[in-house]
Amino acid sequence: MSHLREQQDDASRMEQVVGQRVEQGVDSQQLGKQARLISARARLHMAQAEGAIDVLRERLSQLTGMPAASIATDGESVATLPEMQREPDLAAKVAQSSPAVLYAQQHAIAQSFRARAEHRSLWPSADFASQYAVLAKFNNWLQFFPPHAFERNNATIGVVIRFPFLNYSQRAHAQAADADAIRARKEVESTKNQVSQETLRLQRSVEQLTAAQEVSQLEYEIAQADVQSVDVKINEGSGSVHDAANARTEMFEKYNALQDANFELLRAQIALLRATGKLESWVQQGK
């Protein structure tokens, strides 16, 4: 934010200087519009940055319960991101330990056991049952039935044997369970491929954004050197106000591009940490 404020202040001063030169007839109206455009762009960058900061601060306030106005950024508390984008076989390792893959594997195992149980329901089965009873005398049943028609102490034993080879409904359930088990096994492979592809995409994205960040850094350093060169020319009397304004505008634009590149790289690195399950350990390092 301090750099953006400096950029806005510098653009405002340049707008005032060019406006005075336009009023005096030294510069054209077109140059005055260009100066106002530069100042408007600086205010736009400032408004965008302040809006993004307010949104993030409000989000943190909702997550932590702290007042939004009391939340401030401490750059020293942020741990250095680990270098993971060049780790060999990273995609394969993540695919083996991903929670999504582990869930799919457990689901496939469960479906396999279910299919096995459905098929075993078609096997022959036998049920054994026994019952012991003591008949009471208070209902005078001996007066109505001849002796030895019933025994007061009696026991019953039975067995039921089932041969469900004609149970077509159960066969259909077993076949459906087989289909679910096959689909679950295919989902394991599909989930592994998705996790592996996403990890590889994030890995390559980090590598590309790292290269883009290096390019932006070099462009910003070149723009700084151009500003210093124009300042030297102005001190020597061979430079103009417009050359200085253009050089500073270019430097500010390159700085903004560098900040955007840093942000995109940081976001991609955090996404890769989340995909590999190392985000929590990285956060703990900053405490």
Image (tube, rainbow, N blue to C red):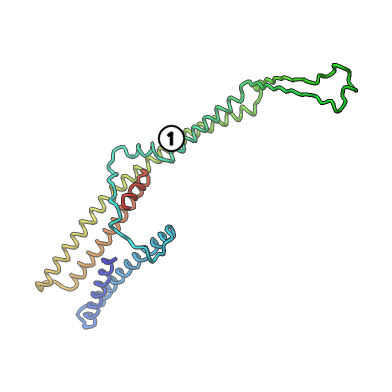
Q: Could you tell me the amino acid type at mark 1?
A: Glu
Where residue 234 appears, as percent x and y from the top left, is 13, 72
Residue furthest toward the right?
143
Where residue 70 appears, as percent x and y from the top left, is 37, 65
In the rendered structure, the answer to whether residue 118 lies left or right of residue 145 reads left
Crowd tier of the residue under label 1, counting other residues whose Cα lies within 10 Å: few below 14, some 14–19, many 20 or above: some
Vertical placement of 128 versus 278: above or below?
A: above
**In-front residue for pair 162/214:** 162
**In-front residue for pair 63/236:** 63
Query: What is the secondary structure assignment of the residue under circle 1?
Result: helix
In the rendered structure, the answer to whether residue 93 lies left or right of residue 31 reads right
Quadrant position of residue 263: bottom left
Residue at 39% x, 38% y is: 97
Residue furthest toward the front?
138
**In-front residue for pair 140/10:** 140
Where residue 238 appears, as percent x and y from the top left, is 11, 72
Quadrant position of residue 98: top left
Where residue 83 appears, as percent x and y from the top left, is 27, 45
Residue at 29% x, 65% y is: 1
Q: Name the residue under label 1.
A: 189
Residue furthest toward the bottom?
24
In the rendered structure, the answer to whether residue 169 lies left or right of residue 215 reads right
Quadrant position of residue 116: top right
Residue furthest toward the top?
148
